């Protein structure tokens, strides 16, 4: 199957770590890979959270979590939320970069994207290359604003201590 990038040649250039690189549209394989990563991440977080429970309680929670995993799809609200966090946005951005620059590593992208300005650049670039449903874009923007406000409030409280 031909991806949108291959069919239209739609890519955009951005500055990443001081050099101009091309960001390509994500394809179905990328989205599938993101879903698998997101499901594994969800389950790993649950496993850490239940480690102090009794064996029976732990098993019940893990079974419930396993039942939820198939519903964590690229179009689910949880996916939209995950795409705006550092790990999720970084992974999506890396997948869009690796089509044209396979030498760029996920670790490089995650390090670069921890700067809030770079996170905004990455998210805007992804939106430009992979236009989403307007309601999802608005939800993602709201989630980013909330996260930014929370981060600012936390930093302010730490400075005032």
Image (tube, grey):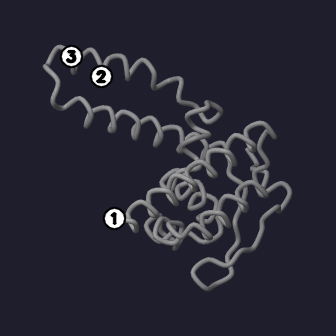
Query: SS of the residue at dot 3?
Result: helix
- Residue 106 vs residue 28, the one in the foreground: 106
Nearer the observer, 123 or 116: 116
x and y, in percent, of residue 86 in the image: 50, 56
Q: Is residue 161 left or right of residue 9?
A: left
Q: In which quarter of the image is residue 50?
A: top left
* Residue 96 in the image: above or below residue 132: below
Residue at point 21%, 21% (across, down): 58
Left or right: residue 51 compared with residue 92: left
What whole-number distance in Å separates the C-alpha atoms at marks 2 and 1?
39 Å
Which quarter of the rendering shows the C terminus?
bottom left
What residue is disc 3 on? 57
Residue identified by numbered label 2: 62
Q: Earlier in the sequence, mark 2 or mark 1?
A: 2
Quadrant where the N terminus lies? top right
**Residue tagged 1:** 161
Q: Is mark 2 on a helix, strand or loop?
A: helix
Seen as rendered, the residue at the extreme bottom is 18
Left or right: residue 68 compared with residue 15: left
Q: Position of residue 105 (x, y in %)?
A: 47, 68
Give the CA separation, mark 3 to mark 1: 39 Å
Q: Which residue is the extreme one toward the front?
A: 160
């Amino acid at each position: 199957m031909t991806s949108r990038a291959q069919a239209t040649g739609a890519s955009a250039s951005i500055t990443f770590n001081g050099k101009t690189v091309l960001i390509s549209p994500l394809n179905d394989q990328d989205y599938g890979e993101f879903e698998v990563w997101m499901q594994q991440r969800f389950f790993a977080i649950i496993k850490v959270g239940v480690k102090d429970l009794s064996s029976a309680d732990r098993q019940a929670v893990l079974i419930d979590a396993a039942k939820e995993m198939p519903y964590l799809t690229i179009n689910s609200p949880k996916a939209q939320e995950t795409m705006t966090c550092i790990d999720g946005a970084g992974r999506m951005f890396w997948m869009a970069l690796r089509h044209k620059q396979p030498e760029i590593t996920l670790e490089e992208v995650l390090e670069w994207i921890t700067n809030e300005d770079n996170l905004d650049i990455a998210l805007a670039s992804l939106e430009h290359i992979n236009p989403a449903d307007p309601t999802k874009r608005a939800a993602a923007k709201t989630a980013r604003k909330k996260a930014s406000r929370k981060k600012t409030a936390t930093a302010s409280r730490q400075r005032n201590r």
